[in-house]
């Protein structure tokens, strides 16, 4: 097992980056600061690009010999994803998660960093710069919330409840038809209140801070899930791909369903899928 860097050092890099290149551009983006990647719902801003560019060498310096899988680097060269299965540990960077929200002046955005070694998430961080807080986890050491004031609080998922009484995040966006329409209809009667933030990081934070019981994501891009899935597990939750097989960061499909425990996962899976 590798010797993991001090989580405080990672949080410092994330905070300094957010203060330097993200927060100053919130609600101050100009037309030329935003462009489409694959379409109008897939955006990148100057804050995404500069944030990833700034954090990449600093994280590698913390862990010599490590590689980096950044969302924007992969957009330019898909071969960067090969680092997920290499022997060297790989940092995973989502420089601004919830970019579309960020461009609209919506506060539901964050910065996410994870560390993968031998296909296993071993460190995870979700920084909410506007909320002045950072959730983090180290494999086997629990999940914690660290405020900018220095206070730390151990995180735990909500207790399981019947599906009709549970609240959570449901993302149907990448499901094929007619499965998408059928699941939307089932969700109206089979589960309790559900929502979508348009920001995986904030949906994970809702699981970790007692605001939600469950979350469902059809697409498994590593920058969206490496950090949050580790924190959810360390906070006592259960997650798996839709076929109930374990999640690995290099598997980009198969979806993810998060629940308080295995029994509630099974119930949600049964209730939501036709």
Image (cartoon, helix red, strand yellow):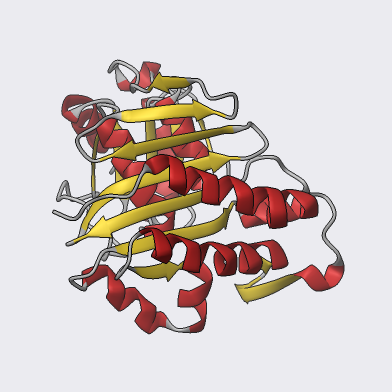
Q: Position of residue 222 (x, y in %)?
A: 37, 60
Task: State left or right for residue 47 relative to residue 223.
Answer: right
Task: Locate residue 43: give its quadrant.
Answer: bottom right
Q: Which image quadrant for residue 21?
A: bottom right
> At 57% from the left edge and 70% from the top edge, which residue is drawn?
53
Q: Is residue 57 above or below residue 122?
A: below
Name the spot of residue 99 as percent of width and height, x first. Answer: 64, 56
What residue sits 60% from the left and 51% below the top?
Answer: 98
Q: Quadrant of residue 230?
A: top left
Q: How many marks?
A: 0
Q: Is 21 located above or below residue 238 in the figure?
A: below
**Picture residue at 39% right of the left edge, 26% below the top:** 191
Question: Where is residue 247 shown, x and y percent of the image?
Answer: 22, 52
Residue 148 at least partly seen: yes
Given residues 53 and 206, the one toward you in this image is 53
Q: Is residue 134 left or right of residue 98?
A: left
Q: Quadrant of the C terminus?
A: top left
| Residue sitting nearer the eye, 20 or 93 | 20
Q: Nearer the viewer, residue 122 or 235?
A: 122
User: Image point 40% across, 37% down: which residue?
Assistant: 136
The residue closer to the viewer here, 211 or 49, is: 49
Residue 188 in view (yes/no): no
In the displayed structure, would residue 149 be above or below residue 117? Answer: above
Provide residue 243's location: percent of width, then percent of height.
18, 50
């Amino acid at each position: 097992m590798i010797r993991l860097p001090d989580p405080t050092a990672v949080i410092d890099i994330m905070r300094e980056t957010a203060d330097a290149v993200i927060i100053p551009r919130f609600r101050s983006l100009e037309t030329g600061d935003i462009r489409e990647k694959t379409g109008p719902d897939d955006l990148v801003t100057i804050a995404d690009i500069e944030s990833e560019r700034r954090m990449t060498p600093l994280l590698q310096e913390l862990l010599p010999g490590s590689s980096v899988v950044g969302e924007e680097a992969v957009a330019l060269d898909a071969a960067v994803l090969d680092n997920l299965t290499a022997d060297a540990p790989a940092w995973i960077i989502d420089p601004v998660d919830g970019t579309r929200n960020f461009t609209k002046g919506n506060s539901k955005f964050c910065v996410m960093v994870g560390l993968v070694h031998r296909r296993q998430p071993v460190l995870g961080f979700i920084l909410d710069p506007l909320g002045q807080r950072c959730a983090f986890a180290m494999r086997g050491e629990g999940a914690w919330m660290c405020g900018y004031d220095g206070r730390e609080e151990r995180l735990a998922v909500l207790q399981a409840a019947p599906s009709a009484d549970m609240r959570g995040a449901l993302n149907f966006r990448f499901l094929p038809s007619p499965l998408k329409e059928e699941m939307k209809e089932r969700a109206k009667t089979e589960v309790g209140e559900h929502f979508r933030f348009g920001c995986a990081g904030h949906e994970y934070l809702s699981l970790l801070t007692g605001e939600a019981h469950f979350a469902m994501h059809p697409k498994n891009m590593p920058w969206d899930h490496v950090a949050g899935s580790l924190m959810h597990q360390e906070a006592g939750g259960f997650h798996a791909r839709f076929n109930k097989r374990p999640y690995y960061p290099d598997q980009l499909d198969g979806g993810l369903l998060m629940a308080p425990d295995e029994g509630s996962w099974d119930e949600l899976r049964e209730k939501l899928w036709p």
